[in-house]
Amino acid sequence: MNDTHCNLAFPGLFKEIDRAVELRKNHHVTLKEIDAISPIRGYNRVMIYDNQLYIIGAGENVNTRDQSTLHALHRAILTSPDPLPNIEFTFNSDDIASSNDPTWAYSRRKEDDKLWLMPDFGYWSWPEPKIGSYAEVQMKAMAMDKKVPWSSKINKLIWRGAVMGLLVREQLLEASAGKDWADVKILNWADEGERKSHNVLSMDEHCKYKFVAHTEGVSYSARLQNLQNCKSVIVAHKLKWIQHHHHLMASKGPEQNFVQVGADFSGLDEAMEELIENDELAERIAENNVKIFRERYLTPAAETCYWRKLIRGWATVSFQPEFYSNETGKNGTDKEVKWRGLPVESYFLLRKTDWDYY
């Protein structure tokens, strides 16, 4: 899809990009700013030049997140029907990126306006908890919804997770304790690994339930975009962390696609009682969830369009990167011309930017 097709197919998707561009239109991102960003955990410095992706530098990887994001970005570049502008930028794959830097991140708080939001790593794959590729998530969710239609879904609110000392998760446990509509249980990953417990559910098994609870984690939670593939009602507390698609979530009106309760899960009991009493309303919300997210804005086509729009947006308020670096030669006078970046294809294989011959 070209840029025009993307705008027609996914209107409203690019709100976060427009916000970030507007913020920097009168004072563009400079090379000095990028040079000043520390190569901390999750740091990646990247260049797109002549429609090729290059790695300039990388910090400590965060599991497979860095690789997933680079693969997704690479796909968007390779499949672009039109040339993309040359850019240089950094992204951070950790849960929380430095809010003082103009870097690309998975999420931000409202006050973190310097951050540019990119799609989550899970849109490529999230193998560690065996969630798998995003295509796999969507295929399994659709299969489960076909196997278990709305009328056969379990009429309860499902949640599984580790508390990890997070207040909002403790508040969910308190708000749901002893309720007939709740199937909320804590996971101990050590017990699950040793098969001492049977509380763990695969992502598609959540689709067996009419209602699915969502909580944030250390920052945002990457679980949300997976749950949004179920024909189920997402019930979430008021979120502090913003992802690139969150503005498409509607908590009221005819297009409502999720249910929002208080930041501390206050009002959860009342919300659940209303949903259970009004099954027609609940099913409409679940249908809207599928139509907006699984069938449209969380598709591979939408993700690819977002990446390309992000590249183009950054280019309008940033500097032109240099492909070559001039370094002093061995005799101290000659200049040695070198590529500044490593082609991503080699980086994918060795996962390092420098190595000895072997």
Image: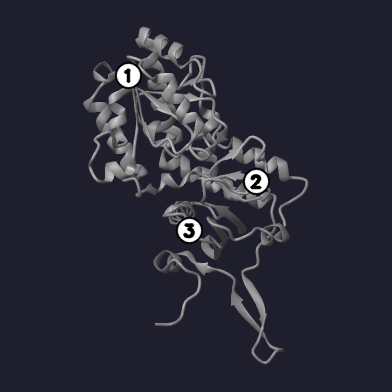
Q: Earlier in the sequence, mark 3 or mark 2?
A: 3
Check whether the beta carbons of the residues at disc 3 and disc 2 lie within 8 A of each other: no
Write the residue at 56% across / 35% down: 241
Q: With respect to residue 313, does 273 lie above or below? A: above
- Residue 303, labelled with which disc? none
**Of helix, strand and loop, which one carries label 2?**
loop
Tag shown at residue 156 = 1
Residue 99's disc number = 2
Q: Secondary structure at mark 3?
A: loop
Indicate the colouring scheme.
Answer: one colour
Q: Judging from the image, what secondary structure is the residue with disc 1 in?
A: strand
Q: Which badge, 1 or 2, is on the more N-terminal residue?
A: 2
State the residue lying farthest toward the right.
Answer: 26
Which percent across, then down, holds residue 354? 50, 74
Mark 1–mark 3 distance (CA, rounded to whole Å):
38 Å
Residue 154 image position (x, y, % from top left): 27, 20
- Name the residue rendered at 61%, 69% in the picture: 323
Which residue in the structure is indicated by mark 3? Answer: 61
Discs 1, 3 touching: Cβ within 8 Å: no
Q: How many numbered marks, from 0 up? A: 3
Q: Which quadrant would residue 319 be assigned to in this image? A: bottom right
What residue do we see at 64% from left, 39% from top?
18
Q: Amino acid at mark 1?
A: Lys
Q: Amino acid at mark 2?
A: Ser
